[in-house]
Amino acid sequence: MNALSGLAILALAGAAPAPDGAGEPDLRFGWRGGDTARVTLTDERRLGGTLRSSGISMRLTVGPDGPTERLVIRFSDRRVASGDQRSIASADPESIGVAVARVLAQATPAFVVTAEGDFVQARDLDATAREVMAASQFPAMPSAPRAFGEVLAELAEEDWSAWVALWRGERLAPGAWLANEATVSFHGEPVRVTLTRRGLEPGAAGRVRMEAVAVYPSDAVRSYTSGFLLDLAIQAKELGDDPEVNARFLERASFSPVTEKLTVDLEAATMHPLVVERERTFSAVAGKHWVEGRERRVHRFEWEASSRP
């Protein structure tokens, strides 16, 4: 999967200058060994009125990384919750939504973070890759297992950025915002990206709600969007199953920028996320064919009482 890099977004956030007179950062990473939460994920892909969705749940556990001050985030009790907007009890077990959910349930590896909340590395990638392949019902591992493991690691880092890393530092009051630009590496090419962070009205006392919007230029993300948009076009019967026809569509297509919007609701004292929503939108047009894509991932966290400060 050619996912947009959470590391790039994190670097942008760290590069944003603090306003004059700003004090010490007031959002600090406060996860501890022993913290546990039930995490649910809803993953959606939409084309116009056509929606493909999958839902899973898993248990998150925080533990020490041996004698170091680092923490290991592990996931267990992984369950398929829904497919194509139906609970698993009523969904068609052969539907695409359920098949995707089976893969999603296995696709998050354990990972290590520092005491300050920096992502260090993903763990157990070989085992995670085997579990994903089994859930996909593929007969064998891919020919480049290391590359496949790198994809899983990038996904974990991307999620961690959206959950915690992007938001550390200054807490933006409702209505306050910061915007900055930076050149980052994307697929080995330098890309100029604009990031805007904004404070939102929190839903309850002791919480913080913020959003971040990043816009990636179309040339840089063509490889990311093309496969998804082509898949959507075929589903919408805009294109057929002829590979040559579809290849010509991609050659002629003009691609929009990708807009990524992240919204987080978290506990101010610990930076435990409560709701994290990530939405990406993009489109392509070639002749009379116009295809719009939308991806939406929502993580919800229910932290156990023992995880409270």
Image (tube, rainbow, N blue to C red):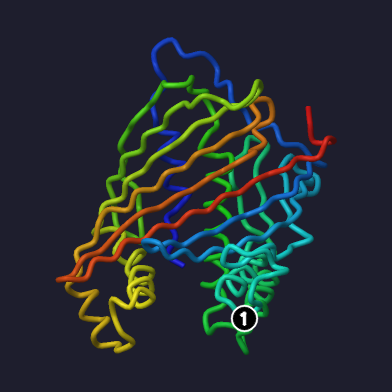
Question: Residue 165: x, y in percent?
Answer: 55, 39
In this rendering, the answer to whether 147 lies above or below 205 is: below
Please give the residue where the numbered disc 1 appears in the rendered image: 94
User: Residue 32's image quarter?
Assistant: top right
- Mark 1: amino acid: Glu
User: Residue 130's image quarter?
Assistant: bottom right
Choose between 216 and 55: the one closer to the eye: 55
Residue 108 falls left or right of residue 222: right
Q: Which residue is drawn at 39% across and 76% down?
A: 235
Q: Is mark 1 on a helix, strand or loop?
A: loop
In this rendering, the answer to whether 138 lies above or below 11 is: below
Question: Residue 191: x, y in percent?
Answer: 29, 51
Q: How crowded is mark 1: few (under 14 residues within 10 Å), some or many (20 or more)?
A: few
Choose between 227 and 26: the one closer to the eye: 227
Question: Residue 292: x, y in percent?
Answer: 31, 61
Question: Residue 12: x, y in percent?
Answer: 40, 39
Q: Residue at x 28, y 80 (%)?
A: 239
**Residue at the farthest right position:** 306
